[in-house]
Amino acid sequence: MSWIWQAVSNGETVFHGPNVGCFRLLFGLSLLIKCGVEWRRGHHRFFDPENYIGLLYATRRSHGKWLNHYVWRSAFFIRFLSSFSIFLGWSVTVAAGMLSVALIVECIGFSKYHAQFMLLCSVSLIFSESASRAFSIGTFYRSQGWTDFLAQSAGARERVIVPLLACLPLMAMYLFSGLHKCRRPFLSGQIAALALTISEREAANRKGIDSTLPPRLRGALITDGGVPRVALQMMMHCVVAVELLLPVGFLFELSLIPAVVAGFALHCAFTAFLPTTLLHFSLACISTYVLFFNPLVVAGVFQ
Amino acid sequence: MFADIHRVEFDIFRFDAEGRRVEINPWDYLPHTYFHMSLSEAKIFLVFLQTHCEVNASGKIDVWTNSGKRTYMVRDNVVDLAGS
C-alpha cells in the first residue's frame, strides 16, 4: 500500500515532508494560469448586464438573485488574490478559505468540472499546517541560504487529512469519468471525431482558440469525412482503461510510478486537444500526484 | 468533459441597414469554453441576441447529441421546433 493509506490505517494524524508544499506550489500556478486565461477571455464580465451567462443564470434560477455582476467580479478578484497568495505560500489557510468561497460562487454561476475539482483541492489546503512553511515566501526570507530553505521545507510538519482530502476527489473523478465513458459512442471514437470536426468548422469563428490539431495528427486520428480511424478508437479505449486503473494504481507503492506516468500522458493528450481550456485543469490534477509519493522520498529529493 | 457531445452549430445571419445579409458569429457573444450547449440554451441565446444585442437572427441551427444531429430553422430569433 502507498504511504497515505498505511498512515490512515495505522491511525497516524501527522507526517513530516514537503508533499503539500510542492502540491501547493503547482496548484497555485494552475490557479494563476486559470485567472490569466479567464481574464483574457472576459470571464470577469459574465454577469454584466449585457452578457449571455447572466441571462442564462437568471432564466434558470427564479430565486437567488444575489449573484449579480458586483458579486461575480468581486469573486473573480478574490480568486486572483488568493491564487497569488497560495502560490507564494502566504497566509495559505485564509487564502484557501477565500478561494473556496470564490470558487463556490463560480460553480453556482458558471459551473465547470475544473472549478469543482479546484474547490475540493482548496478546501483541503484550509486544514494545512505546512502549506505556509514548505517552499513559501516567508520561509525563504527567514532561511539562511538555499540549503536551509530546502531543509526547512523538506521537514515541514503536516496533517494526514490534507493529502487525503485532495487525493480522494482525484481518484473518484478518474473512476466515475472512466465508468461514464464505457459506452459505445465514446469507445468507437464518434464523439471525439465529431468534436474535432465541429471545432475545425468553427475555427475561424472561434479565432483559433482550441480549434485545430496539427494536420498530420488530425489525419492519423480521423478521415477527411470525419470518420474515426483505428488509432482514435484505440486512444479512446486507452483513455477509459487508464482512467479506471489510475485509482487502483494510486493505492499501491509498486504501481505508483506507472500510474503517475500514465496519468501524466493522459493529461498531456487531453491538453493537446484543448490547450487553452484544459492546461490549468491538467496542471491541477498533476499537482495532486505528488501527494501520493512517500514524504521521506520527496524530502530526500530536496536534501 | 469528452464523454458526451451536446453542441450547437449556428448558421445564422441578420440584415444590415442597407438590406445586406451579414453572418452572425456566435463566438463573439459566447465564452470560449462554452462547448456544451443544448437546444433550450440555444433558444435562450437567440432571445439574448434579440433583447440584449438588438440582433435579429435568422437561419438554421444544428443540434448535435450522442444520438445524432437535428437541424432547426430560425426566423426572427425563434426556433421552428419542426426540426429535420
Image (cartoon, coloured by chain):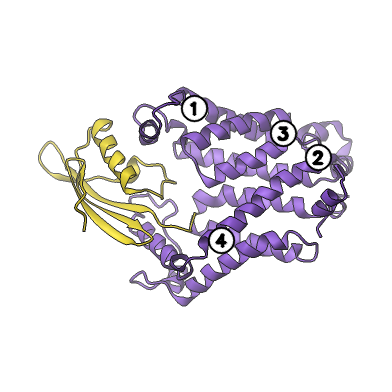
Q: Amino acid at mark 2?
A: Ala
* Alpha carbons under labels 3 and 4: distance apart: 31 Å
Q: Chain of mark 3?
A: A
Question: Does label 1 or label 2 sit earlier along the sequence?
Answer: 1
Query: Can residue A33 be seen here?
Result: yes
**What colour denotes chain A?**
purple
* Alpha carbons under labels 1 and 2: distance apart: 31 Å
Q: Which residue is mark 2?
A: A134
Relative placement, left or right, of A272 versus B51 is: right
Q: Chain of mark 4?
A: A
For disc 2, the neighbor class at 10 Å (few under 14, some 14 to 19, many from 20) is many
Q: Which residue is mark 1?
A: A73
Q: What x and y, as percent, mark residue A237? A: 54, 70
Q: Which quadrant would the N terminus of chain A be assigned to in this image? A: bottom right
Q: Which residue is mark 4?
A: A179
Q: Nearer the viewer, residue A47 or A80?
A: A47
Q: Amino acid at mark 3?
A: Ile
For disc 3, the neighbor class at 10 Å (few under 14, some 14 to 19, many from 20) is many
For label 2, the SS is: loop
Q: Are marks 2 and 4 on the same chain?
A: yes
Q: Nearer the viewer, mark 2 or mark 4?
A: 4
Mark sitting on residue A126: 3
- Dots 2, 4 in contact, CB < 8 A: no
Q: Residue furthest bottom?
A: A230
Q: Chain of mark 2?
A: A
What residue sits 87% from the left and 52% below the top?
A: A296
What residue sits 65% from the left and 60% below the top?
A: A264
What residue sits 72% from the left and 37% below the top?
A: A125
**What colour denotes chain B?**
yellow
Q: Nearer the viewer, residue A266 or A8?
A: A8
Q: Nearer the viewer, mark 3 or mark 2?
A: 3
